[in-house]
Image (tube, rainbow, N blue to C red):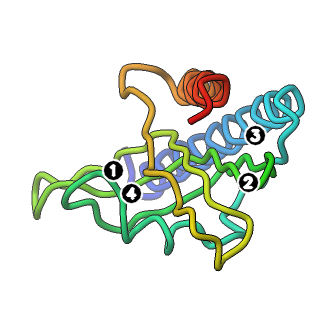
Amino acid sequence: MTPVAFFLAVFALTVLAAVAWAIWQARFGHQLRSLARGWKMHYAEQDRFNLAARLARSFPVVGAADLRVSHVLYASREHRYVWLFTACWTVGVTRTQRRVCRAGTFSEPRERDHAEAATPIELAPPGLNLLEQYVWLCQSIDKKAHRGG
């Protein structure tokens, strides 16, 4: 195989992978928008509320680095804001580094000077796919709301 043919083959595979990723992201975003409508929530693909900076202070994974938040579902319920999101972070050192993505949730009071604090960040179980993690977390929120806590 000539170098030019090899380059073109690698380039074509790269373009194919980028297109596949874009299709997956669009499909996932559409599924989350549908879930958000059903749960009377709003959807934002990017972290327009700068949640990553607020979550980094109390993130429940020790040693998590480069925390990024995306696919945010949010709503105002009673006197609190409720957030569901995808959190991606890096774990490990040097050669064993890997990226982990999980759905998470927390809520915080609407009023910044309110005596109540934000709830601890809850991450969905890792054995589920990302969409199932959102469903699991929403059911967890509903159970807590019915228990009153």
Provide the residue designation for mark 4.
3
Position of residue 68 measured from the top left corner of the image (x, y, whole percent): 49, 62
- Write down the residue under mark 2: 45
> Looking at the picture, which amino acid does disc 2 mark?
Glu
Coordinates of residue 81 in the picture (x, y in percent): 72, 55
- Which is closer to the viewer, label 2 or label 4? 2
> In this picture, is 135 found above or below 63?
above
Q: Earlier in the sequence, mark 4 or mark 3?
A: 4
Give, as a three-letter code, the residue at label 1: Arg
Residue under the point 44% across and 42% down = 122
Q: Which mark is residue 29?
A: 3
Whichever of callouts 2 and 4 sits on the residue coming sooner in the sequence is: 4
Q: Residue at x 36, y 58 (%)?
A: 59
Residue positioned 75% across, 34% down in the render: 32
Q: Nearer the viewer, mark 4 or mark 3?
A: 3
- Indicate which disc, 1 or 3, sits on the residue closer to the N terminus: 3
Q: Is residue 132 above or below residue 7?
A: above
> Residue 65, how many percent across, how many down?
29, 66
Residue at which label 1 appears? 99
Earlier residue among tags 4 and 1: 4
The reply to whether dot 4 and dot 1 touch (C-beta < 8 Å) is: no
With 127 as the anchor, is 79 left or right in this view? Answer: right
3D distance between C-alphas at marks 3 and 2: 7 Å
Could you say whether the residue bearing mark 3 is in a helix, strand or loop? helix
Q: Are marks 3 and 2 in contact (CB under 8 Å)?
A: yes
Q: Secondary structure at mark 4?
A: helix
Hey, which quadrant is residue 136 in on the image? top right
Q: Which mark is residue 115?
A: none
